[in-house]
């Protein structure tokens, strides 16, 4: 299953090994890990709660993978997104793509992350010294996704 | 009946996580019903506010038709990843 | 030390953890793993021997990292390149970059891999059914590096 | 003395991994000395052949000056990664 939503942490090496299986045609694995920072928009962040919309999330992520397959020739991809309570330094999200050559793996991985940011129903509620707050969407995320349309 | 789900910041602002609405022809009709409640409903769901609507887990637009049994979700701007 | 040449295999999770240390400003980790394929240019590949030019290799890789730092705002990077005898499915190379946001990590990681391919003194000798052969440089690798000059 | 190092495919083709050359003013001069040996030397190091030259671990060009103690390396096109 190339899309997983879970509260548990994940091990990058194990996930990449499982994704590669024993396919000797793979020459390239590009991957990305998103991590909770202790600071956002100038405020200290003690932790965050990640909410999603079950059912739609899996559907949205699968659509992004389908779009990526239509654009690049790659073997497999994996998206893991954690939900629930997370602390600074915790891993939030993992995307990995396997392909024969590196260009496709890099581009598809970057594309999946950019659209995950704009198209998948996840929301972050941060704990700051002044209380809890829902994060606003970043304008730069829309710009990052839009550049793939050129 | 149409199930309406409110997520994240919108759920907190509206004080409701989900409800059943007897009927609405389209997404636009449903939004009018909700806005006509006034107060935070009119404010949070006003035209031009940055939220999206999903019908049965797929993004929809104002013209999307609704039928009994549909699940409509009101989604604030997403911030995952 | 952000550049390592070694015969031993490496563990991706452990390397990323060591690179992140406990820096809570890191929000993004992009990484790449290159893997030995069992087929190249239409021929079965039973294995390969990776040679390098000690002294110059470290210098060339460090220069690539310096160039990347001049172009993007990122925290740290790591390059591991294996040498010696390798078999299909073996990991060859690992590049990881940490940054506050994902764009810088993705671009710097891709840039480092592209220039590693064209500027670092590594050579592959493949074992095929018709004997040993030194690999020719790929024209597509020069094109991949050249696009960063635009 | 200048140390000259041959790597990978060039080492195999020339049958030599390294040698000492008494003196050469520049990289271009050194290449002329080597080509003048004829045979595989003239062939492998001919003008237009795809190899690069490094002096003391940094890429050099034909005009790069050489002095005693320098290490010059002849590098076939690289294929790492």
Image: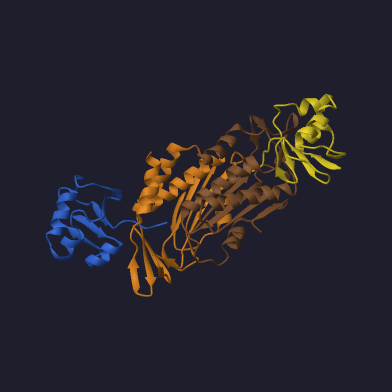
Chain colours: A brown, B yellow, C orange, D blue
Q: Quadrant of residue B15?
A: top right
Nearer to me, B55 or C37: B55
Which residue corresponds to the image point at 25% horizontal and 53% vertical from the top-left? D71
Nearer to me, A39 or B16: B16
**Whether residue A59 can be seen here:** yes
Report the quarter where the C terminus of chain C lies.
Answer: top left
Can you give x and y, in whole percent of width and height, for residue C16 in the image?
56, 51
Q: Quadrant of residue C4?
A: bottom left
Which residue corresponds to the image point at 43% horizontal and 37% vertical from the top-left? C70
Can you give x and y, in whole percent of width and height, for residue A38 in the image?
65, 37
Q: How many marks?
A: 0
Nearer to me, B47 or C23: B47
Along the horizontal axis of the image, is A56 left or right of A118? Answer: right
Which residue corresponds to the image point at 68% horizontal and 32% vertical from the top-left? A136
Along the horizontal axis of the image, is D81 left or right of B60? Answer: left
Which residue corresponds to the image point at 53% horizontal and 41% vertical from the top-left? A148
């Amino acid at each position: 299953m190339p899309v997983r939503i879970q509260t548990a942490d994940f091990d990058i090496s194990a996930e990449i090994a499982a994704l590669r299986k024993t396919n000797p045609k793979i020459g390239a694995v590009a991957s990305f890990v998103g991590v909770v920072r202790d600071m956002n928009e100038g405020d200290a962040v003690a932790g965050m709660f990640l909410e999603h919309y079950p059912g739609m999330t899996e559907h949205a992520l699968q659509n992004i993978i389908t779009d990526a397959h239509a654009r690049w020739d790659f073997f497999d991809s994996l998206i893991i997104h954690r939900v629930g309570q997370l602390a600074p330094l915790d891993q939030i999200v993992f995307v990995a793509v396997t392909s024969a050559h590196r260009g496709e793996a890099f581009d598809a991985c970057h594309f999946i992350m950019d659209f995950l940011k704009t198209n998948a129903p996840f929301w972050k509620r941060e704990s700051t010294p002044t209380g809890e707050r829902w994060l606003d969407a970043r304008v730069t995320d829309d710009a990052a996704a839009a550049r793939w349309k050129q | 009946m149409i199930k309406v789900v409110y997520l994240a910041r919108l759920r907190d602002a509206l004080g409701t996580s989900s409800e059943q609405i007897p009927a609405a022809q389209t997404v636009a009709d449903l939004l009018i019903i909700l806005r006509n409640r006034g107060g935070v409903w009119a404010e949070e769901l006003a035209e031009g506010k940055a939220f999206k609507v999903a019908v049965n887990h797929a993004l929809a637009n104002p013209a999307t038709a609704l039928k009994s049994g549909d699940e409509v979700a009101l989604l604030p701007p997403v911030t995952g990843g």
